[in-house]
Amino acid sequence: MSENPNNRINFTANCIFKAFVLFYAAWIFLPCEGYAAVNVDGKLDEPEWASAQRFTDFVVIDPLTLEKPVLSTEALVLSIPEGLLVGFICEQPNKEGRTRTITQRDAKSLDADSVSLMIDFNGDGQRAYEFSVSISDSYRDGEISQENQFTYVWDGVWKHKVNEDEDKWTVEILLPWSIVSMRESKGEKRRLGICFQRQLQSTNQKYAYPAVSSDRPHFVSEFAGVEVATYSSKELELKPYAMGLRDNLDGSKTGKMGVDILWKPSQKIHLLATVNPEFGYVESDDLVIDFSAYEVRHTEKRPFFTEDQSIFNDKMSMEDIFYTRRVGSASDKDGNPSDIEAALKIVGSAGPLNYGFFAAQEADDAGRSFYASRVLFPSDNLSLGLLSTYIERPFLDRNALVNCLDYDFSLGRSIRFTGHVMGSRIEEDTDKTSGYGFYNNIRYSPSDHYFFYLSLKHLGDTLELNDMGYANRNNIQRGHLTATYNQTNFPENSRAALVAWSFDTIYDRNTDGVRLPASISFSRNEKMRSGSALNAQVSLNIKGYDDMLSRNNGLVLLNNRWTGSLSYTTQRRGMWSKSISARLFKEGYDGWATAISGNVTYYPNEKLNINLAFNPTWSSDWFKWVWEKQIGSFSRQQFATTIGVNWFPAERHEVRLRTQWNTLNAKAEQSYNIGPDAHLVADNAPMKDFASTSFALQLRYHYEIAPMSDLYVCYSRGGRDNIENPEDDTLSLMGDSTKLRDSDQIMVKLTYRFKLI
């Protein structure tokens, strides 16, 4: 007799509930934190600070002038048993105008005067972490991989506080030694790589010690070497969650519970496990209307899949060997999101090696099994790594194995070689296929003024990465060259502080030797002393064949296409910050398209900001695949708009409203058929006007109970509709989209972190 799935669900829920109760009892009797030695209050007045190492030689790195800053900055570092203590002393009299905007955690821009600590705990230049704090005590943390690739999906547990005086403001940061996995030190000292930065919001200037910039080919590997006393630490934490959801469409109510477990028996190994993780009701993806042949790539937002993930990050230009959004994605059976039963991750080091292992299992008989392993051997000038992924897809009777060997080699500080060699092996039913590819690039920076980049990519037509990775296409060979000159020798009374002149060209063909459209572009990017920026670009897509537009129904020859763009961004002035850009381009044969992007933020006070982003597009000649060899030319209007309100009524309380509209209205103009020579030949085949509208609204309340312990209350609704031969205009369709209710729900989620050791 088959097992009743409801019994299985109830059994799992009961077990998790009992575990939740036990965890709560353990929390009552065991201490949650152990930071008694130092009071993190931002004042830097404890006696321990007298023995701290001090760093004062900051220079201006944005714009990259390397001049001495007008305002002084001092950074302090002190190692104690509880963790690494870091302090900042920022000279800034009140008359200089301090910007104190409050932002949510991990905001793309803190929109305020701020400081950043970037630290490589192993001191090998392979991986670093950023910890940023603004003068308003808003904060952000993230990872830095491959020298200068920043991501802000990782969240750590650390302490910070800000204190203001008349002539200066200070920041105090405490990073517990268990915050990330790191190699054990051999002696009483640990050598760290450290970079300190300070952002002056009023002029959009950035100071740093040492004089390194993420715009250079080498960044993390050039951090200042700092020796500190080493300490060992252990940690065991449990983070259960409970979620309740009411569907307002049918009145149904559902609940879900799960738990994340993090065990750190030593600094050199971290073990993470999750049971029944939620997919992501708190953070939703942006609305996208896309009719291209390429898959849309989304950012990972689930906590378990972002924790200690950088060891697996092996991202190339447009490809990922391990794309975590595959786990729990659309089921092979019915296309609905898959439930995840459990997942496990191990990250650590053994001698000179860094390693990681990942496994996840989806529920039911169609559930996929995911595995990934990573080893990395770093050294001073050369690092070698291997990333392997394997997935079992029982519903499709398909297994996929991908191996990728990567290297990172430096010649001095000016030349850096990086690359990947990859292969796939697919077994489906009784068929077996193999494919290979490579991606290699050279970065050359002879001085602070010149930068050159050359990459060569080959992805074979039988290389398949998308079972567990991401590639927007295979069957491609690409050469990409970029040259940049940074001009900084402007007089003090000049409007410009830095002007970057860039030349960029891309040459593409597929592995059958068919030449795809190439591109050449020139750009001028100016950073002004006022903090504003003015960017201009002109580019040409050279005549070539498109082998993706017709969905494998034949090549399409495209003619030359020009694009010109201009953008202007202002630094926040008083209550406003603004940016606007305009683009004129071709996306068909003859007609032109115009797109405008604007972003305005209003700050009535430091606790409230209101943002409006809009992006209208008008096109008289837009190519879209219709059916088989039929390509249609449409005139289109598309409006994408976002309104966001962020309010911070009190410390640790946040209210956010986010509303998005995206409406496309297309009128059929001309039908084409693909001719024998890949030219499009006009015909009278029937085509229909169509429209696509989408709407999403989320009102969210967030209370941070404690670090990594949160209460969320969310109301969300929205939907999408495709309309044939619409009678209304674009603005009317956009207004009507607010009535869409494919989903309408209220969600309450409670997560609490119990630190047992």
Image (cartoon, rainbow, N blue to C red):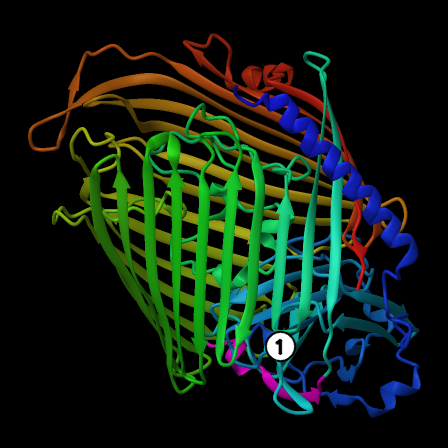
Q: Is residue 485 above or below residue 713?
A: below
* x, y percent for residue 25: 88, 49
Position of 377 with respect to 426 (left or right) is: right
Instruction: Report x, y in % for residue 626.
Output: 28, 20
For the residue pair 156 and 275, the one nearer the viewer reads as 275
Q: Residue at x 81, y 49 (%)?
A: 23
Of the 4 image quadrants, the one containing the C terminus is bottom right
> Which residue is outermost to the front?
1
Q: Quadrant of residue 523?
A: bottom left
Count of numbered circles in the view: 1
Q: Secondary structure at mark 1?
A: loop
Q: Is residue 298 visible?
A: no
Q: Is residue 358 visible?
A: yes
Quick check: 225 above or below 314?
below
Q: Position of residue 41 (x, y in %)?
A: 90, 70
**Three-letter code for the amino acid on which mark 1 is drawn:** Phe
Classed neighbour count for the residue bearing mark 1: other residues with Cα under 10 Å, few (<14), some (14–19), many (≥20): many
Instruction: Tell me which residue sits at (71%, 69%) in the image.
Output: 178
The residue that label 1 is drawn on is: 121
Does residue 354 lie above or below 99 as drawn?
Answer: below
Q: Which residues are magenta?
A: 218-230
The residue at 75%/41% (across/down) is 241
Q: Is residue 123 left or right of residue 692?
A: right
- Is residue 12 inside the magenta stretch? no
Residue 549 percent location from the top left of the image: 26, 33
Horizontal side of 427 relative to 253 (left or right) equals left
Q: Nearer the viewer, residue 484 or 583?
A: 484
Give the residue at x 12% y 49%. Answer: 513
Vertical position of residue 257 compared to residue 121: above or below: above
